[in-house]
Image (cartoon, rainbow, N blue to C red):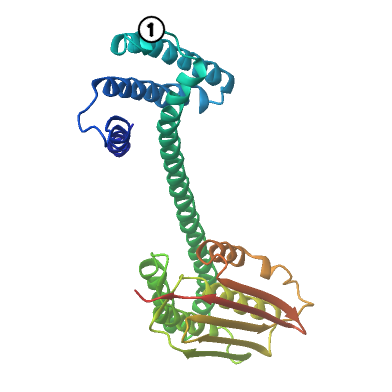
Amino acid sequence: MDYKEAIYQVLFLLLLFALYVFDRHDPEIDTSRVVFYLFYVLVSLFVSYVLIPTFFYTKKYLLFALSLLLVLGFVYSIEEFVLEKLFFPDNRGKYVSNVFYTLIDIVPFIIMMVSFKLAWDANKNQREVEQLRSSVQESELKFLKSQINPHFLFNNLNNLYSYAMVSSPKTPSIILELSSVLRYMLYDCKEDFVLLDKEIKHLESFVALNEMQIEGRGTVTFTVKGNQRDFQIAPLILVVFIENAFKHSTNSQSENIKIDIELEVTDAGELNFICQNSFQSISNDQNLSKGIGLENVKKRLQLLYPEKHLLKITESDNLYSAFLSLSLNSKS
């Protein structure tokens, strides 16, 4: 029994003491009622803290029932042959009462005490389950975010290597943009939620970094509308769709690449995000939409925005489209 349970147990026993011992018509405390009360308390504590943990919680229900019957038999015997003869020798102690009438006074008291114990344990177990569930979700989120970072880094280092090999003048700009993006991913997005305007700045750097590899082979648009400063968002969710769009287009097309990204935030905090990219279905790029990044973002959405998001991904007429709507958290 922890100290909180002990405190509540004492308060509960004091309440029962007041209800059982005190008589509003008689201000004096009856010694016999105090003794009977203490006896019932000891029996109830034995049932609650010995029989229930030993037999009931271990699913030994038959042993629990038999033990409970033995306890009730013991209580009946002590009350009839000891306590009543001691305190009421001239009336109740002269005869043996019916078992039913004796137990009908005892059992409700025991039931109240046992109910307190069961309710306390049920509440404690529920809190432990919630803490465990929260811990599991937090661990899974950290794992999913840790997968995103190396996935992104691997792809962009390959691009940087390609530019460095041909001594491209764009190499310093790529290093600068990559440094900005990595700084955000490593230091600014350790929490479950970040400021939306910071996340958008990260997306702008990310788009600029990847746009360099297109080199006139297509067009990239990135449009942002609405209030960005008053809301928060889970980091590294939207970037997965953008990364997928660049990868999907550039790996399947050598020209006429088109990537359109639009982000709108309503005054009510509803974010609508659309990311579309062209692609050639005849290429060997069939499994790009099934990569680790997209699967991770789906899991994170389920964990962080349960029943507060809508994700639709479609492919038609050589156009891959991802639409995400979610309810943002207000800025704290």
Give me the residue at 51% from left, 64% from top. 148
Residue 207 visible in rendering: yes
Residue 11 x/y as whole percent: 28, 38
Give me the residue at 71% from left, 77% from top. 314
Residue 227 x/y as whole percent: 43, 88
Residue 167 visible in rendering: no
Is disc 1 surrounded by few (<14), some (14 to 19) or many (20+) residues within 10 Å? few
Task: Classify residue 25 by image quadrant.
Answer: top left
The quadrant of the picture occupied by the N terminus is top left
Left or right of residue 37, residue 140 in this image: right
Q: Secondary structure at mark 1?
A: helix
On screen, 105 above or below 290? above
Q: Residue furthest left?
A: 28
Residue 221 x/y as whole percent: 56, 91
On screen, 266 above or below 297? below
For the residue pair 270 and 204, the one nearer the viewer reads as 270
Task: Classify residue 83 by image quadrant.
Answer: top left
- Amino acid type, label 1: Lys
On screen, 121 above or below 254? above
Left or right of residue 122, residue 240 in this image: right
Left or right of residue 35, residue 203 in this image: right
For the residue pair 194 and 243, the one nearer the viewer reads as 194
Task: Classify residue 332 by image quadrant.
Answer: bottom left
Give me the residue at 40% from left, 31% from top. 113
In the rendered picture of this protein, how many numbered marks are placed on residues?
A: 1
Residue 45 x/y as whole percent: 37, 25
Residue receiving disc 1: 94
For the residue pair 18 and 175, the one nearer the viewer reads as 18
For the residue pair 254 and 266, the one nearer the viewer reads as 266
